[in-house]
Amino acid sequence: MHQFKALSLAWLVPFATATASAATPVCSTVSFQVSATAQNEVFLSPPNPNNETQVLNFFYGTTSVSGTFTIDGTYCCPGPCNEGTVLEVLVHGISYNRALWSGLGQGNTYNWQSYAASRGYCTLAIDRLGHGTNPQHPDPLNVVQGRMQIEIIHQIINAVRTQSANPLGRTFNKVIYVSHSYAGWLGIGLANAYPTDADAMVLTGFSAAVNFTPFAFAELESYSRLRPAVLPGLPLGYITFELESQREADFYAGAYSKTVALADYALEDTWTIGETGNLGFVVPPPSYTGPLYLATGVNDKLFCEAPLSACQSILSSTQELFPRVTKFGYTAVSNTGHTLMMHSSAQQTFANVHTFLDQVL
Ligand SMILES: *[C@@H]1O[C@H](CO)[C@@H](O)[C@H](O)[C@H]1NC(C)=O
């Protein structure tokens, strides 16, 4: 099902930082070739009630979609990359890309990958299909959908677990799925379809109580219209926030730097209408039994609710989405909005997550 570019460690070395210590992770850029097939949704704009084909497709509307995709990542380890026994696979949310996990270039305070390395964890932050530096921008309605993203993540996890010739140059027998926002739904879909892919799951900026209202009021625009110079010719179905003020209001709250919020808007990525058009893959996973940790800002307008006790209650009841999870923990991060790793509380969030992981793995 999958093949890889012949990337040797010799190729990786020039991209690695020169010296390694506990505080200086060694990072490199990697690139996976993934062949994936997904039962994607067929979107019909309202079916013609007199056409049986359309009526049936509307109710039973999935079709098999396949492709071979290049998925870029940033791979970091505590030191030389044979150190570290656990790999976190970091999956960004909508309108972000893998740069989120290194703090969008806004300093070490916000750098999840750096922090994880300081606690002995390797990380692989990937650009989901259609995002970041990935060279392909497939059909944003019919190809770039949640189910396809799940299949691609599954293939990458399978490769880093079992294929010694994978782009990381080694395998890991413990893999943690770490998500932000929308990728939490992908995590539920992954745990449903492939319950043993993740040894633990950490869902950030997430809960079972999503409030879509802030999104419904946001003005959205096709990315190629908003920023024609960046990705000319990008299909119009790749959309994003038009206004800095609305993006900041949806993603930031409490204690954060205005400079960071401005950089976040300047660097914003896209999402596709196919990703948000259907969440039918979000079905509670009956067989996932690993640990689960949630980290969400108390002032996250999309997934939590102030005061602290209200957010704690939302996060606590989110365990019900995972019927067989027993090792469960959460942190409701005070004074913090949706993109919690870019807030002043980031180091505390990172510490809480990794303390939980140390305890359960
Ligand atoms: C019914 O819809 C299908 C799918 O859109 C189309 O191919 C077909 O021609 C339609 N049939 C009629 C009788 O209009």
Image (spheres, rainbow, N blue to C red):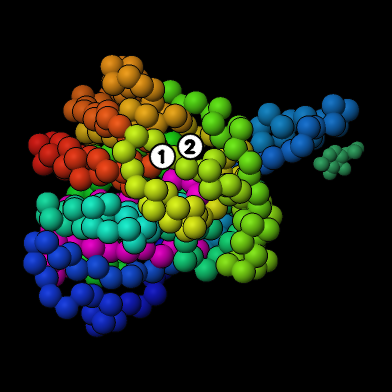
Q: In this orientation, which residue lies closer to the viewer: 63 or 182?
A: 182
- What range is drawn magenta here? 69-95
Which residue corresponds to the image point at 33% horizontal and 70% vertical from the top-left?
Answer: 29
Distance (Cα) linking label 1 and label 2:
6 Å
* Circle 2 SS class: helix
- Labels in figure, total: 2
Q: Is residue 205 left or right of residue 217?
A: left
Q: Kindly identify the amino acid type of the residue bearing the numbered disc 1.
A: Tyr
Locate the C terminus and report the quarter of the image it occupies. Answer: top left
In terms of image quadrants, where is residue 212?
A: top right
Disc 2 residue lies near ligand 1 with CB under 8 A: no
Residue at image location 43% in from the left, 23% down from the top: 209
Q: Residue at (43%, 56%) from the top-left corner?
A: 263
Visible in this render: residue 150?
no
- Look at the image and tell me in which quarter the N terminus lies: bottom left
The picture places residue 215, in percent across and down from the top left corner, at 56, 34
Residue 250 numbered mark, or none: 2
Circle 1 residue: 252
Establish if 262 lies above or below 354: below
Q: Quadrant of ligand 1?
A: top right
Q: Quadrant of residue 84?
A: bottom left
Question: Looking at the image, is 330 positioned above or below residue 28?
Answer: above
Along the horizontal axis of the image, is 62 left or right of 37?
Answer: right
Query: As rendered, which of 194 and 354 lies closer to the eye?
Result: 354
Q: Is residue 187 magenta?
A: no
Image coords of residue 276 (percent x, y): 57, 40
